[in-house]
Image: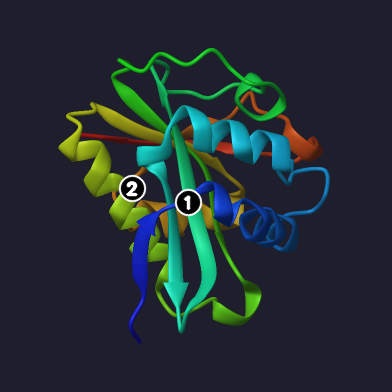
Amino acid sequence: MNVTIRRATVDDLIEVAEIEAESFPSSEADSLEMISFRLRVEPEMFLVAELDDRLVGFINALPTNVERLTNEFYTAAPAVDQNAVGVAAMSLDVRSNYRRRGIAAQLMNALIDRARLEHKLFVSLVCKDEKIPYYQRFGFNDVGVSNVTLGGARWHDMIMKF
């Protein structure tokens, strides 16, 4: 399986939004406007995966100085400090018929590698209970239930420090 990881472009936005809508309930999925904002603000940390000339997944992140995310990251266009010391992984999505092939892991590893190359001090994210072991495999630590209330779900703050 030959997966290509590359930076996203504006031409990818519609497909990325489709994958996001397929991956999360509507109460949790990012809008096209939010996805577009993230691509404009931090193109270096917005990566897509291609397989067989098809966009099959993506990951995006924003620079941040806070380790524990807040609702603002998901509900508004947060103020972004390009000199921030950390990275907040916002979405990691793979088309349903391409899951369980290691594509999400390749995307996450690529984001972690970029964060290290940019000398960031941490990567943070939120995930649901059932995803905690998945992110722990990359080296993330569960630091407790998050204050994020996106979609009315219970989220956990996960942090990887370098």
Q: Nearer the viewer, residue 54 or 73?
A: 54
Mark 1 belongs to which amino acid?
Answer: Ile
Q: Quadrant of the C terminus?
A: top left
Residue at position x 69%, y 21% from top? 76
Per the rendering, the mark at residue 131 is none
Residue drawn at 62 percent across, 40 percent down: 35
Residue at mark 1 to residue at mark 2: CA–CA distance: 8 Å
Give the amino acid at mark 2: Leu
Q: How many marks?
A: 2
Look at mark 1 in the image and give the residue it sits on.
59
Identify the element where label 1 is drawn: strand
Residue 78 drawn at (x, y percent): 59, 17
Secondary structure at numbered mark 2: helix
**Mark carried by residue 111:** 2
Q: Residue at left 38%, top 64%?
A: 105
Whether residues under marks 1 and 2 lie with C-beta atoms below 8 angstroms apart, the answer is: yes
Q: Nearer the viewer, residue 37 or 131?
A: 37
**Image quadrant assignment for residue 16:** bottom right
Residue 103: percent from left, percent from top: 42, 70
